[in-house]
Amino acid sequence: MALGGGPAFASLPADPAAAAAPSRGGGRPALRHGSAREAGLLPGPLRQLVTDAEAFLQPSPEHPWYAGAVLLAGRGRTVALHRPLGMAVRYQAYDEETDTGVELPTDQQIPMAEDTVFDLASVSKLFTSILAVQQIERGRVGLEAPVASYLPDFGRAGKQDVTIRQLLTHTSGFRAWIPLYEAPTYQEKVRRVYDEELASPPGTAYLYSGLNLISLQLVLEHVTGRRLDVLLREEITEPLGMRRTRYNPPASWKPKIAATEDARKPWSGLDRGLVWGEVHDENAYSLGGVAGHAGVFSDAWDLAVLARTLLDGGGCGRRRIPRPESVELMCRGGRCPWSARGPPAPTGTRGGRPPGGRATRRAPARPPPCRRIRRGPAAGTGRRSAVCRPPCPAPPPSWSVRPPPVSSSMATTRPSSYGAGGGGDGVGRWVS
């Protein structure tokens, strides 16, 4: 199922004559740069990625100005394409009369770099969803538990039956958006979420809403006693070595951050001028830059590490975020990118017991989880992969991460992760 939001997975054509590069050990996916052949990919589609992205940097009546982008694609542990395009900071304003972007002087523009950091916007929802799944694994949160069992005030205005699952799957009944930034204090913003009436009965309709992940943030902070930015650092970015992923990047990062837009009314809810180095989303900005639905900043390489981690079933070595069965749960809308075993048991059960909840009904028998062993040269690649006894397919090695340009008069700001499950195992995706 689609939990919150985040990377979508797609494939790149593999070169059948090339073997995947060996992986390095350690507690996180060890990525390295290499050629298309070393990655086992065909060079033509990689070149086409660059050509397609460059086309979006040119003036066109069909899309706004795209200042730049960072492309990243690879297979296994090998990054075969890591290409910055265009500028990270190019425009200083938008001219309404001429419908054009006002460029900065050339000496003030900043070229895009491989490690340019972007405002991830709604991809932030994926991180919140992973943090929620971790707490479900630890028994602190129940997938089917009412949100009001953790936050009693949430049950106001007919929301007493909304569950954690419904927040994660955008089926809570919340409308898409409310202007929380109009509330003068943090407490008032939270009160408006609690007082918000539902647009539809819980569980009856899908409607993508940032209010779901803001509510989930409040649950996580309540049950853990930690702020969401602390949870992100301690539970995801530090274990995976994602050193350029965080909320509220410091001022020292600003020269390496892509600008977002000229935020002025009426197209923006707030008059902020050039948004650069701060979260673009108005609600997240008004919440201090830390919100469940938006606010995370990252670069292409860190997103590749996260994508590879999920394709590997949630981790590598002894560090895991989250467990493989939880990755399957997050892929419930389709097959997992790392497994061909099909969807998990209904109701989020694991042997009849939902994580963090009481037993409901026994799940169908499932194969034992994969365990990691070393495949020797006779097996083909000589690299470490997941193999089951009894056998089941290993995690497919293909993936790509492309932060593409988005609608903005400034720089590209919403990178999305794409990864591939090779060998026809089906494509799992997070919808953002």
Image (cartoon, rainbow, N blue to C red):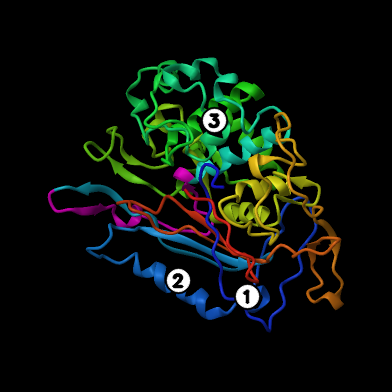
Please report whichever mark, 1 or 3, sits nearer to the chain's N-terminal start: 1
Tell me if label 1 and label 2 are in contact, CB under 8 Å.
no
- Residue type, mark 3 in image: Leu
Residue 304: where, in percent of width, then height?
A: 60, 57
The mark found on residue 216 in the picture is 3
The mark found on residue 50 in the picture is 2
Residue 281: where, in percent of width, then height?
A: 39, 37
What's drawn in magenta, residue-wise? 97-122
Q: Residue at x 62, y 35 (%)?
A: 132
- Residue type, mark 2 in image: Val
Tell me if label 2 and label 3 are in contact, CB under 8 Å.
no
- Residue type, mark 1 in image: Ser
Give the class, few, some or many, for how many residues have Cα within 10 Å of label 1's Cα (few <14, many ≥20): some
How many angstroms separate mark 2 from mark 3 (CA)?
A: 37 Å
Residue underneath mark 1: 35
Give the class, few, some or many, for how many residues have Cα within 10 Å of label 2's Cα (few <14, many ≥20): some
